[in-house]
Amino acid sequence: MQSAVAEGLLAYATAHPGARLVVVTRPVGYQPAALVEWRHYELTPFDDTSVTPNLASLLDEILRPSSRSLADSYAFVAEKIKGSKAGKLAARSPMLLGLSASLLARKATLTGRRGDLYRQIVDLIESEPSPRQTSSIAPGIRAWVLDFLGYQLTLHPLTTAQAVEDACA
């Protein structure tokens, strides 16, 4: 659906000239022809020598506000990723680097296996309590409204929030 997505992005950009759009995609299978006038960037993986200092820097920033600290973040990170493929996996993208740093801040062990990393991330998310209030709306009604909301947004991606709310109501 690249053509349809590109047409929608172009229509949105035309309708909102003051908006700044950032589109992120995997490079595999991406055809830039429809958005040839737009700037394109590629995030390349970090080199092997920069993983430990970058993880250590992120770890320092994560721990600083909570007053928890490690005596030497660089040594801690080097020890945690030594002998595993964790550094190579974290180097693949800034997102994986940040998620790895978040897990290290919680004293997790990084194995270097992608499936393990994603499982740890999901476990971390599920371990946090939801900030949302519990709802008195029946689960069936809530599911129907969410399904209809998704349908409306798929059918009319450039519609206004008010129009979607009216359609759902």
Image: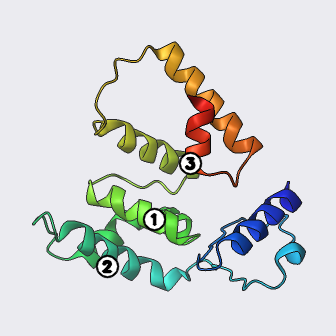
Q: Quadrant of residue 92?
A: bottom right
Residue found 63% across the figure and 78% down from its top = 43
Q: Nearer the viewer, residue 17 or 89?
A: 17
Q: Is residue 92 above or below residue 4?
A: below
Residue 59: give x, y in percent of width and height.
29, 70
Q: Pointers 1 and 2 in contact (CB under 8 A)?
A: no
Label 3 sits on a secondary structure element that is helix
Q: Amino acid at mark 1?
A: Gly
Give the numbered dot on residue 83. Answer: 1
Give the numbered dot on residue 57. Answer: 2
Q: Amino acid at mark 2?
A: Ser
Residue 125: give x, y in percent of width and height.
38, 43
Q: Is residue 44 above or below residue 119?
A: below
Q: Is residue 27 above or below residue 46?
A: above
Q: Quadrant of residue 56?
A: bottom left
Q: Pointers 3 and 2 in contact (CB under 8 A)?
A: no
Residue 16: give x, y in percent of width and height.
64, 72
Residue 131: give x, y in percent of width and height.
28, 39
- Label 3 crowd (10 A; few <14 / some 14-19 / many >=20): few
Q: What distance separates the C-alpha of mark 3 from that of mark 2?
A: 40 Å
On the image, numbered disc 3 is attached to which residue? 161
